Amino acid sequence: MMEKKQKKLKGAHAKKIISKKKEAKKPKEKSSKPKEDYVYQKIDDFADEEKDRIYVYAVVLDCSYAYLKGEKYICVAKLIDDTVHPGAATEYVSASFFARNKDDLPQPSKVGSIIRIHRGQTWEYKKKYQLNCDVEIKGAWTLFDPFEGALPISHSGRTYTWVEKDNQRLKEIRKIAKDFLSKNELETISLKDALKKKPKDFDPLCLVLDVKKKEGDVKFLLCDEEKIVSVKVKPDLFPTVGPQDVVRVRSAYFSEKDSKKLTMESWSNILRVPKEFASAKNLMSALKSKKVSDEVKSALEIYTPQLDKENIITKLLKEKTAKVTPLKDLFAEAAKGKQKLFRIQCNAIEVGPKEPKEWLMVYDTKTKEMQKVDDVLKGKTATLPPGKEYYYKLQLYVKDKSVPEDNNMYILFLCTIDGKGSEFINIGLKKEKPTETHLKELKKIYQVMTRPWNTLDLVVEAVDVSGGQTVYFIVDTELKI
């Protein structure tokens, strides 16, 4: 297809926009207009031949992270439009961006982001033609959100050119992105298949369960419907990725030492997949289906908020329990009367001790001595000696669920040494030494209890202690975890 000649710009709508983010000082009061109205092409116009000075709007299907190669930083993206896309004669065009400064490269955070390239160039590489944009020579790019806004997310250089026609061009390419990605899934591989086939690197589609800082890095906990994995990255990478995002991980591989950990290279990336797109919808449907593994189902209970209903994770063992008492009233006046049992509803903010295995203690029924588990079950001792029993001892730091405007913190206790409250935690432990399975159950209980969307509906008993103080112990309640 012959390349169109560039037209002279006769209108007065063209303008050069200065990014506020990169503006060092106020620009001079001097109009600056482009001399030409650029002629934009479809990807198919240059995908199979060498061309120079290419102007194009495209959809980002995939993109590497910026990494150093030689003297310049580079990132490589897969671009599509309505002429070139998976299922067409050409599935995508590979676009390489070059700059001496990493911040001068496009770093889209979402699949489906829109990129505009000015003065690109194609040349043949490994029997395929790739598009190149070197901002150190003549190339320029502008990056937009997949759905909204005429202002770019980022762009190369201090300014970018914008004319009236660009509003319609941006609208059209966004429609192309939405139409394609809402009907077609991204090319990915399941975590289970990747572990079985062990490719050199692979691109899974996952739900982000949790994000936390750990040992100076950021740890992402990810899952699909069959498996859970984690990956550690530097703290400045992927700041927009958060819990409950669907993401496509580019160029990951399993750790040689641990099949539950992914490793990433300097060019590996994590791109969010908007919920409107087919891949995200289908993954979320799969996570709600019967084919979800027990491991993943358990993790979803911990990390996924139940926004469509109130999620009460306890069961009251006395049917005729009184109405809910606000914690502020309970700690101020209610316990001064003859009533000793109260019903409350709260959210657990923290548990003490914070390490769940430390909740479990040993009680000597003869000497009344209280001991740590490790002090009793030393060496090869596999069961508790006669006359010794397990009990739980912990405290909950809670906020009132029944009175949202009450921001005070309250403390509740659980101590099953006398049998009261023993129904609250049940991990199937009798006399045997706690196994890894038992400890994982306690950890899961901690995680579920402290999720902000989970409510504890409890019966508590008022107990007077020394100094005339009243404290409250959990009784007649069972955790449904």
Image (tube, grey):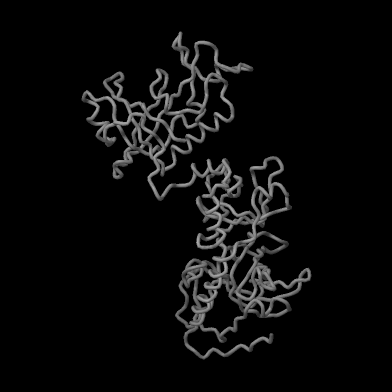
The residue at the point 56 percent across, 86 percent down is: 35
The residue at the point 39 percent across, 47 percent down is: 309
Measured as percent of width and height from the top left, residue 127 is found at 78, 71
Instruction: State whether residue 202 is above or below residue 257.
Output: below
Q: Can residue 218 be seen in this snapshot?
A: no
Front residue of this view, candidates 51 and 289: 289
The residue at the point 40 percent across, 50 percent down is: 308
The quadrant of the rendering that contains the N terminus is bottom right
Residue 214 image-quadrant placement: top right
Instruction: State whether residue 47 is above or below residue 385.
Output: below
In the picture as drawn, the residue positioned furthest to the top comes out as: 366
Measured as percent of width and height from the top left, residue 169 is found at 53, 78
Q: Is residue 423 left or right of residue 160?
A: left
Instruction: State whether residue 422 is above or below residue 168.
Output: above
Front residue of this view, candidates 376 and 144: 376
Q: Can residue 444 be seen in this snapshot?
A: yes
The residue at the point 32 percent across, 41 percent down is: 407
Measured as percent of width and height from the top left, residue 282 is found at 55, 57
